[in-house]
Image (spheres, rainbow, N blue to C red):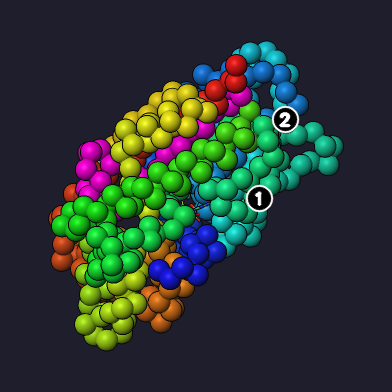
Amino acid sequence: MSMDFKIENVLSMNGGQTDSSYARNSCYQEISLRILQPYLEESIGQMKMVPCGRFCIADLGCAAGPNTLHVAQIICRAVQKKYKALGIGMPDLQVFFSDLPCNDFNLLFQSLPLSVPPDGRLQACHYFAAGVAGSFHNRLFPRSSLHFIHSSFSLHWLSRVPPEVENQMSSSWNGDRVYISKEGRVEVAEAYLRQFQEDLKSFLRARAEEVVEGGWMFLFFSGRAGACPRQQGGSGAVGDILELAFKDMVCEGVIERATRDSFNLPFFSPSALEVRELVEEDGSFLVKKMEFLSMDTEMKIQSDVDFGRMVAKQFRAILEVLIASYFGEHVVESLFQRFAERASQNASVLYNSLRQGGGILAIIERACTP
Ligand code: SAH
């Protein structure tokens, strides 16, 4: 990707409520949330709550869709339950929904349960909502202003594709591939890992300023079970299919070879150990839980063709905007058609990789400064 192509300026999940929107194509994330809910409630139950006028929560990389509101509700209910159990005064709850500026905040705001009855009395589980646009690799909130941070399916997004991967002179050049591949160069995976490390460091540095002492972060993002960074699990398998689809488009002359060669996907699935090392090295947060959590979910599939179409639709909702801003909107329809075909031809490999997928659950507490 050329240097003037900044991911944070263009990235967003497909907005709106259409058939190709993220809101309608995030059932995997929805199922995962069901698995994560008990961990989320347990974490809040374990926090040391203190009396305060307002309890501030942030959801980083919130997108817009059913999960966004559901998560906020789960967190608010758990916080209220905890305060009630402690018998200390109930604070007002404030939820900051945060994502990159291109996110469909309009859809999000329109779906919020914002109404306060005329008598001014807040209903159970009412929260004050606000949107915050910006990258979580930078500061987003005032110093010591947040008590709880949630982030799901977002932290695997990198701030940029590691530049070495797109440099023909480098041993990390990824050539005609568009992502880390099991068959690709190990240097490519190592370059991605270094970028992830740099980004997570910036993330932790910014959050260390923003989270109050004793505040918690609940982070879940795409990750891998094994040690080798070349084995990217589900995202690796999707990258392989996308690579085939791009190859078809290049062969047909729809996309130029050089343009394709300069494109790579900006995400990375780390191992729990890689994340733990970064958190410990940073030192601002204590690890409460750090593990690879399998999301082994059975998918109902009629046929390979159906499966191909389904996966294409899901990943189109995630990747369309990014791909359109790099290659132009005219490529999107045929690219994802090729993707669906290639996915159905490789259905069993892709199915197994996606099914065995999971992510890193990192629950960490802001350490107290001595
Ligand atoms: N949390 C939601 C949405 C996940 S989609 C869910 O679980 O369903 C991932 C989101 O992360 C996208 O909305 C994307 O815009 C956002 N994201 C990616 N990189 C980001 C960054 N640097 N800063 C803020 N948000 C980012």
Residue 41, image x, y percentages: 49, 27
Left or right of 244 in this view: 107: right
The answer to whether the residue labelled 2 contacts the one labelled 1, judged by CB atoms less than 8 Å apart, is: no
Image quarter in which the C terminus is found? top right
Left or right of 365 in this view: 35: left
Q: Hey, which residue is sitting farthest right in the picture?
A: 119
Q: Is residue 296 above or below residue 16?
A: above
Q: Hey, which residue is sitting farthest front in the picture?
A: 169
Q: Which residues are magenta?
A: 213-239
Q: Badge 2 is on which residue?
A: 54
* Residue drawn at point x = 54 percent, y = 47 percent: 136
Report the label total. Answer: 2
Q: Alpha-carbon neighbours of circle 1 within 10 Å: few (<14), some, or many (≥20)?
A: some
Q: Which mark is residue 131?
A: 1
* Residue drawn at point x = 44 percent, y = 23 percent: 288
Q: Is residue 63 above or below residue 43?
A: below
- Residue 182 picture quarter: bottom left
Judge whether residue 298 can be spotted in this image.
no
Of residues 45 and 240, the one nearer the viewer is 240
The amino acid at mark 1 is Gly
Image quarter in which the N terminus is found? bottom left
Q: Alpha-carbon neighbours of circle 2 within 10 Å: few (<14), some, or many (≥20)?
A: some
> Mark 2 to mark 1: distance in Å?
17 Å
Residue 88, image x, y percentages: 70, 15
